[in-house]
Every structure is written in C-alpha cells, then in structure tokens.
Image (cartoon, helix red, strand yellow):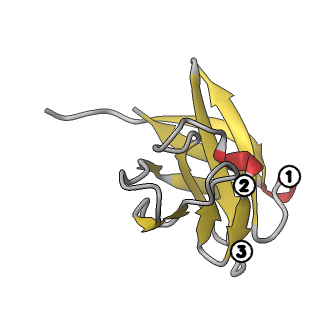
C-alpha cells in the first residue's frame, strides 16, 4: 500500500543546538527532531519504545539519543537500538530544511 507523506513545518533550524534535540507535537503524536554535530537534521518518533518517555529530555551524543529514564540508546539516524534495556527500534521520519525552517514528513 502506498502511503503519502505530509510535510509539516516543525521549527526553525536555529531552534536546535548543535548535537541537540527538541520535542515537536503534531496531531496527537510526539516527535523528536535532532541536529547532528555535522549540521544535519533528523527526526524520530518522540517517545522511547521501552517505557514511552519523551526522548527530547534525553542526551544526544554523536548520532545517538539516550533515554532519560533507563539510559537505553538509539541511533537517531537509523532508529536502531544501541543499548539495553531498549529492544524495539524507533521509527524515523524524513526531514528537509528550507529557508531556515525544518519540516518533517509524517504519514
């Protein structure tokens, strides 16, 4: 089945510090938007797959986000788990930056 994506403007590019993350809520869902050390932008679902804690309250290190509750880690680039206790990958979302604004694609 073909799923169409809707691009939603989430924030300004400068709203996210280098190696940082912010929370973005849209249509009843929470997302986390990241800025990597090499100035690229990424987005994932915003809640940890282990206990549904907001990842934007976590620590970004390189290309990983650490959940603030149990320190489980994910790659925010691929969504893959990187450290226990998390064992379910995060869903990632396409990102584009235009005119200094960050947009994410949501289904």
**Pair 3/2: label in front:** 2
Q: In this view, does 47 lie to the left or right of 17?
A: left
> Which residue is tagged 3?
39
**Percent coordinates x, y for residue 66 in the rendering:** 63, 61
**Percent coordinates x, y for residue 54 in the rendering:** 66, 40
Q: Which of marks 3 and 1 is nearer the N terminus?
A: 1
**Pair 1/2: label in front:** 2
Q: What element carries label 1?
A: helix
Q: In this view, does 81 lie above or below 23?
A: below
- Decide: few, some or many residues near mark 2? Use Cα within 10 Å; few <14, some 14-19, many ≥20: many
Q: Is residue 93 left or right of residue 58?
A: left
Q: Is residue 68 above or below residue 65?
A: above
> Which residue is tagged 2?
58
The quadrant in which the C terminus is found is top left
Residue at left 57%, top 18%? 28
Q: Which of marks 1 and 2 is nearer the N terminus?
A: 1
Q: Which of 56 and 100 is in front in this view?
A: 56
Q: Is mark 2 on a helix, strand or loop?
A: loop
Mark 3 near mark 2, Cβ–Cβ under 8 Å?
no
Q: Nearer the viewer, residue 50 or 4?
A: 50
Q: What element carries label 3?
A: loop
Q: Which of 30 and 95 is in front in this view?
A: 30
**Percent coordinates x, y for residue 30 in the rendering:** 60, 32
> Which residue is tagged 1?
15
């Amino acid at each position: 089945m073909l799923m169409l994506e809707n691009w939603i403007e989430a924030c300004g590019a400068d709203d996210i510090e280098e190696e940082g993350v912010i929370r973005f809520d849209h249509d009843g869902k929470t997302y986390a938007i990241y800025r990597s050390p090499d100035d690229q932008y990424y987005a994932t679902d915003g809640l940890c797959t282990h206990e549904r804690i907001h990842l934007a309250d976590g620590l970004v290190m390189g290309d990983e986000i650490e959940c603030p509750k149990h320190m489980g880690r994910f790659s925010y680039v691929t969504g893959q788990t990187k450290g226990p206790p998390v064992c379910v990958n995060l869903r990632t979302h396409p990102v584009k930056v235009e005119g200094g604004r960050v947009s994410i694609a949501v289904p």
